[in-house]
Image (cartoon, rainbow, N blue to C red):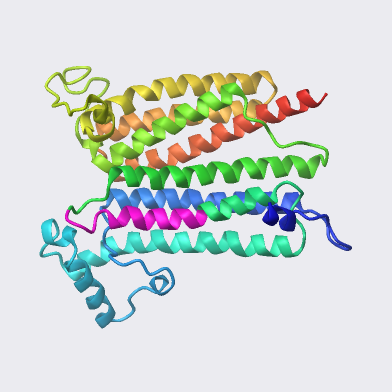
Amino acid sequence: MASDARLSAPARAGTVPRPAAISTWLLAVAALVFAMVVVGGITRLTESGLSMVRWEPISGAIPPTSPEAWEAEFTAYKASPEYQKINRGMSLAEFKNIFFWEYVHRLLGRFIGLAFALPLAWFAWKRAIPRGYGWRLTALLGLGGLQGLVGWWMVASGLVDRPEVSHIRLATHLLLALFIFGALIWTALDLRRLARDPASQPARLTVTAAWALSLLGLQLLFGAYVAGLDAGFAYNSWPRMGDEWFPSGTPMLQPFITNFVDNPIMVQFVHRWLAWVVAAAALLLAARAWSRGFRIEAFALVAAVTLQILLGIATLLTGVELWIAVAHQAMAALLLAASVTAANSIGRRSAQASAQ
C-alpha cells in the first residue's frame, strides 16, 4: 500500500532503520493504553462515564476553570437521563467527583493519540521505520482514531432515554482497546528481535497461541458484559451462585441465545466457568513456551492467570469492592500482555525453524 511504501522506504543517505527505538516507543504507548484501561475501569465502577454529555475533541481538552464554566457544565448534565432519573438533586461538588474520572479518561485518550501520531510522523520523516512495518503502524494509528469514535458511540447510548451505556458498545470499546494494547506489544517484540538480528522475521501465530488468545478474548468479552450489565452484583458467593451451581429460578430470555448477551445471571455464570477453560489454555501455552526455552515468559503467564483468577473470586466475594474490581480489570490487561508475549516467543522460534 502507498503508506507502507512511504513509511518503509529504503534509508536515504545518513538515515537507517531504528527498530529498537520504535520498539521502546511502542511499549511506552502500550503502557499508556494500560493506564487508559485502568482509568476506564474506575470510570465505569464509579458510574462517571455519563458525566460529560458533549463530545468536543479539541475544546473538551480544557476542563472548566471558573464557577461559571462549572455551572454551565453542570446545567448540561442536568438535562441528561442519568441526572433526571438517578442523580436528581446531586450537588455541584458531587458532580465534580464523577466529572473528574471521565475527564481524565478522555484526556488520556487524547494524549495517547498525540504520543502515537507525532513520533510516528517523526520516524516516517527520518525514514527510520523498517521495511514491512509501515502498514502495521499505520493500521494502529487508524485503530486509535476508531477507538475515539467508538468511545463516544458508547457514551451516546446512555444519553437518550435510558441512563446507562449499552453493554454491547462497552464491550466493543474495551475489546478494541485491548486489541490495540496486544498489537502494540506484539509489534514491539517483533521489532526488538529485528534490532538484535536484522535477518529475523516477524513472529507467526501458532495454533496453540491462536486458541489461547481466542479463548482469552472470549473471556474478556464476557467480562465486559459483566461490567456493562452490573452482573457482578447478581451473586456474591463462590463457587456456587447462592446455594446452587446455577440458580434454578433464573428467568430466561427468548430466543435462548440472547441469554448469553443480555441475561446478567447467565453472563456471570459463563464468566465464572469459562475462566477455567482460559486458564487451561494459558497453562498449555506456558508449557509450550517453557519447553522451547522461554522460561521467564512461561512463568509470567502462569503467575498472571493465577492472580487473575484469585482477583476474580475476590471481586465476587467482596461484592465488587471498587479497588479489587479495578485490580481485576488491570490484571486482565496484564494477562493479555503475558499471553501475547508467550505467543510471540514461540511464534518467533517457529518462524526461525521454518526458515531453516
Looking at the rendering, in which quadrant would you find the C terminus?
top right
The residue sitting at 66% across, 31% down in the picture is 204
Q: Does the magenta stretch include residue 152?
A: yes
Given the current orientation, which residue lies at the most extreme right position? 13
Question: Which is more toward the observer, 15 or 320?
Answer: 15
Q: Horizontal placement of 194 versus 277: left or right?
A: right
- Was residue 324 drawn as part of the magenta stretch in this picture? no
Compared across the picture, whether 317 is left or right of 16 comes to left
Query: What's the residue at 84%, 61% (across, down)?
Result: 15
Q: What residue is at 70 percent from the left and 23 percent from the top?
A: 293
Q: Residue furthest front?
A: 1
Report how many numbered discs are placed on residues in the image.
0
- Choose between 142 and 198: the one closer to the eye: 142
Give the residue drawn at x 38%, y 38%: 328
- Quadrant assignment, res 189: top right
Vertical relation: 140 (above or below) 261: below
Residue 49 visible? The answer is no
Where in the figure is residue 29, as x and y percent of width and height?
Answer: 57, 53
Type of secondary structure dominating the magenta stretch: helix
Q: Where is residue 9 in the image (x, y as percent from the top left)?
A: 79, 55
Q: What stretch is highlighted in magenta?
A: 144-161
Task: Locate residue 287: give its quadrant.
Answer: top right
**Which x, y percent locates residue 331?**
44, 38
Q: In this view, does 323 lie above or below 64?
A: above
